[in-house]
Image: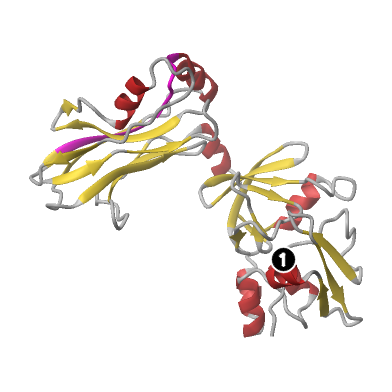
């Protein structure tokens, strides 16, 4: 026998539902208990609060037909109705496949359901390797079709995005790094933010601070460029390339190279990149300044020691 575990992931809030990826049928027979059905039963009377139950079951290692399903579950039935109306329909994805699983190996049903896609697949638990022929996808969402109709651009420089996939015009250096040259599709604009697809996920570019100095379109035109900067970066000296890869600067860099490494300075603090000093502030309100020589080469970084280590390649 092998074993197959259902999986789940939480929505952004308790009202967005829980994404369940389960074995729905085995050889044409509905599973009597899976993570979604067991969680729904356990959540009765708890209002909008979902109590998630993990489920794993044995599966024969002979040729076995499995139906895999990905769906959004809610604790209260009324939530399911409202969620379907808000999203324009059911986000369920289903697929059937005949598999011969390996003896004594654990597997997991996994997937993704977001604004752009609904997918489900079977993978080996330890390695995460997808079992051949078990990946299924629903038709593209209207959001995905809208994004696909826009041209592919590239991030101008190293950008940083928080856990909500928000890229601020402050480009907080403490957040995870998104490398320069990452493909991006920008497909929706609002007053102070633009909606994009990066790495297959919805991401926001936010004009949080420099609203008096630039428009949203001006910010976006700086951050998303037509030409992939990777070719230009490859022409830089090796030590410059190494610094850029880790999102840091080092003395002697040009302004162009520093922008690729750290992003543009905040426009409200440095309205023009022709200035001899570029001011940044970290998310924890710690300032640092890039100081430029008359030849427009990076001369020094003025910052507390703990911030210098975040932005400067030290000898």
Q: Position of residue 47 (x, y in %)?
A: 47, 17
User: Which is nearer the eye, 192 or 286?
Assistant: 286
Q: Position of residue 172 (x, y in %)?
A: 71, 56
**In this rendering, would 172 be left or right of 212?**
left
Quarter of the rendering containing residue 93: top left
Please say if 13 is above or below 132.
above
Q: For residue 151, say whether it is visible.
A: no
Residue at the image position 59 percent from the left and 47 percent from the top:
163
**In this rendering, would 28 be left or right of 76?**
left
User: Which is nearer the eye, 275 or 37?
Assistant: 37
- Image quadrant in which the C terminus is located: bottom right
Quarter of the rendering containing residue 181: bottom right
Residue at the image position 29 percent from the left and 35 percent from the top:
22
Q: Which residue is mark 1?
A: 262
**In this rendering, would 40 be left or right of 163?**
left
Q: Secondary structure at mark 1?
A: helix
Q: How is the image coloured?
A: secondary structure
Please say if 63 is above or below 269.
above
**In this rendering, would 137 be left or right of 266?**
left
Which region is colored magenta?
A: 65-77
Q: Position of residue 119 (x, y in %)?
A: 38, 40
Q: For residue 1, say whether it is visible.
A: yes
For disc 1, the neighbor class at 10 Å (few under 14, some 14 to 19, many from 20) is many
Q: Position of residue 201 (x, y in %)?
A: 53, 46
Is residue 57 part of the magenta span, yes or no?
Answer: no
């Amino acid at each position: 026998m092998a074993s197959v575990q259902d999986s789940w992931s939480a929505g952004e809030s308790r009202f967005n539902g829980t994404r369940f990826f389960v074995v729905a049928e085995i050889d044409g027979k509905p599973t009597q208990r899976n993570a979604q059905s067991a969680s729904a039963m356990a959540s009765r009377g708890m209002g909008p609060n979902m109590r998630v139950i993990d489920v794993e079951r044995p599966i024969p290692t002979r040729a076995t037909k499995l139906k895999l399903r990905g769906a959004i579950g809610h604790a209260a039935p009324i939530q399911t109705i409202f969620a379907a109306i808000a999203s324009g329909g059911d986000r369920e994805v289903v697929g059937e496949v005949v598999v011969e699983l390996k003896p004594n190996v654990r597997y997991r049903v996994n997937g993704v359901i977001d604004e752009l896609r609904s997918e489900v697949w079977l993978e080996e638990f330890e390695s995460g390797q997808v079992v051949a022929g078990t990946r299924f996808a629903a038709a593209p969402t209207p959001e995905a079709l809208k994004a696909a109709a826009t041209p592919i651009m590239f991030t101008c420089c190293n950008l940083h995005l928080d856990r909500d996939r928000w890229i601020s015009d402050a480009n907080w250096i403490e957040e995870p790094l998104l490398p320069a040259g990452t493909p991006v599709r920008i497909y929706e604009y609002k007053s102070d933010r633009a909606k994009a697809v990066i790495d297959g996920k919805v991401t926001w570019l936010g004009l949080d601070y420099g609203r008096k100095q630039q428009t949203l379109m001006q910010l976006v035109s700086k951050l998303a460029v037509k030409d992939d900067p990777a070719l230009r970066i490859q022409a830089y000296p090796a030590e410059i390339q190494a610094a850029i890869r880790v999102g840091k600067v080092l003395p002697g860099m040009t302004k162009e190279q520093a922008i690729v490494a750290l992003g543009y300075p905040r426009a409200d603090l440095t309205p023009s990149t022709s200035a001899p000093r570029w001011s940044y502030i970290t998310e924890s309100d710690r300032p640092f300044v890039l100081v430029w020589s008359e030849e427009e080469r990076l001369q020094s970084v003025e910052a507390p020691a703990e911030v210098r280590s975040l932005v400067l390649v030290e000898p």
